Image (tube, rainbow, N blue to C red):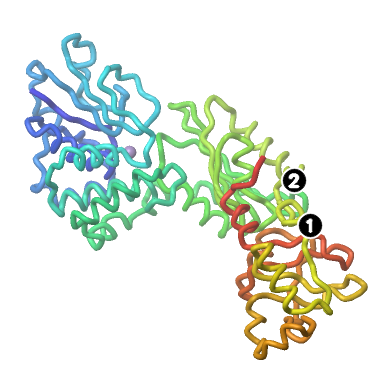
Amino acid sequence: MIIITTHKGSDFDALASLVAASLLYPEAKAVLPTSINANLKTFLAIHKDLFNLYSPKDIVFDQVTTLVVVDTHSWNRLEGMERLKDRQDLEIIVWDHHSEGDIETKRKNIRETGAAVTLLVKEIEKQRKLITPIQATLFLMGLYEDTGNMTFPSTLPEDAYAAGFLLDRKADLHILSTFLRQAYGKKQKDILFHMIQKAKRTEVSGFTISIAKMEVEGRIQNLAMVLQMYREIVNVDAAFGIFKDGERNKCMVIGRSNIDEINIGLLMRSVGGGGHPGAGSALLKDVNPDIIEKMLFELISGNQHSSVMLSDIMSYPVVTVTEDTMVEEVAMILRDLGCTGVPVEDKDENIVGVISRRDFKKVRKSKQMQSPVKAFMTRNVVTIHHDRSAMEAAKLMIKHDIGRIPVIKDDKIIGIITRSDAMMYFYDLLPD
Ligand SMILES: [Mn+2]
């Protein structure tokens, strides 16, 4: 007999992987642990009859020849499988996206995708197995839950491909939103309440910061959302949560910032995690929460690259033209540079305008090509001071619908910030 099982405290990814595996091993019995999370309980209350699921106590373990484990490969995360642990003749197959686990087998399919079901869906597609719209819906639910609707940094292109495949197989997004909605549940509420009770606000380098430390049990979903709510309620510029999971000896550090000057992504990268300017996290092993707290304070007060200045990311040198340059000549310069516009300076090198391809539309007669650009340039030039941040530059670009802003220091142009410079920064493509 072949059985398939998954981790205790089963979530949608666990059930989805279990059901997906039963398509790959049609003769197997799918064994769902009795401990499952609240969302899944609600879902199964309605859908249970659609899936042929067994409980660990239904299994005659002496008859088991093959064990398929999905969405985990740790013995202590399985329920009721103790009797199989030391069986030498047992064949084991693993499908998992976690890097850690102690279940040993040669038949391991492990890749750190956003969701475990992604790996199984890929195999289903490869083997051209048929799936029903309800199965596709369940698989997509697992995928969305474990990837935070494809927003968690752990999401891989394969997860998105799998989602596309499942939508093609008629996964129903209405059902999805009904069951995935309860993200803010009792666990999250308890944690938020505990954090608020102990909330402390601290001034660091002129910013208000709050760092909450607490013990949690196991992996808690949606802590990032809890942190977001916490930051808003405590009303600080940046908030951090240090969640210690004593059993796994790991600390989850999550940060949220509302200001440019504290870049969470940079802070988290400096402790081995990742993220974006506004939000990020790091998972640290064998560390004391007090040390992490101290480290965060030091990083913020030292202002370690916590704000990237425009002068770090702008393009330079800048090609400028004088206001007497002929339109014809500017057109050639733009073509040679491959850009859409250049700043225009007067004789004293003060910026007086910008001439761009857009302005050339004002040129009606061919003889105007020989007139100076000052007749056609845009005079209200949006500029930005060199000590401003990339975020402010991006806001200006959006507000004025412009793609390049001259960067000014002591009334002189020292560089230009373009949309692609800003994008390089926001998507963390800067060279170290
Ligand atoms: Mn999972």
Q: Is residue 364 visible?
A: yes
Please tell me which of labels 1 and 2 falls first in the chain: 2
Compared to residue 273, the image places residue 391 above or below, namely below
Q: Is residue 189 visible?
A: no
Residue that sits furthest to the right in the current view: 348
**Mark 1 vs mark 2: in front:** 1
State the residue position of label 2: 303
Crowd rating for badge 1 (residues with CA inside 10 Å; few <14, some 14–19, many 20+): few
- The quarter of the image that holds ligand 1 is top left
Q: Residue at x 45, y 37 (%)?
A: 216
Q: Secondary structure at mark 2?
A: loop
Expressed as whole percent of the image width and height from the top left, the position of residue 286 reads 54, 24
Task: Give the number of callouts.
Answer: 2
| Image quadrant in which the C terminus is located | top right
Q: Secondary structure at mark 1?
A: loop
Expressed as whole percent of the image width and height from the top left, the position of residue 140 reads 26, 50
Q: Residue at x 80, y 71 (%)?
A: 321
Compared to residue 46, the image places residue 380 above or below, namely below
Compared to residue 143, the image places residue 71 above or below, namely above
Q: Residue at x 9, y 15 (%)?
A: 62
Expressed as whole percent of the image width and height from the top left, the position of residue 221 reads 40, 45
State the residue position of label 1: 317
For the residues labelled 1 and 2, the Cα–Cα distance comes to: 28 Å
Relative to 365, is 59 on the left or the right?
A: left
Expressed as whole percent of the image width and height from the top left, the position of residue 104 reads 30, 17
In the image, the residue with mark 1 has its CB under 8 Å from the nearest atom of ligand 1: no
> Could you tell me the amino acid type at mark 1?
Pro
Give the camera-side residue of 417 and 334.
334
Relative to 151, is 296 on the left or the right?
A: right
Q: Residue at x 91, y 74 (%)?
A: 347
For the residues bearing labels 1 and 2, Cβ distance under 8 angstroms: no
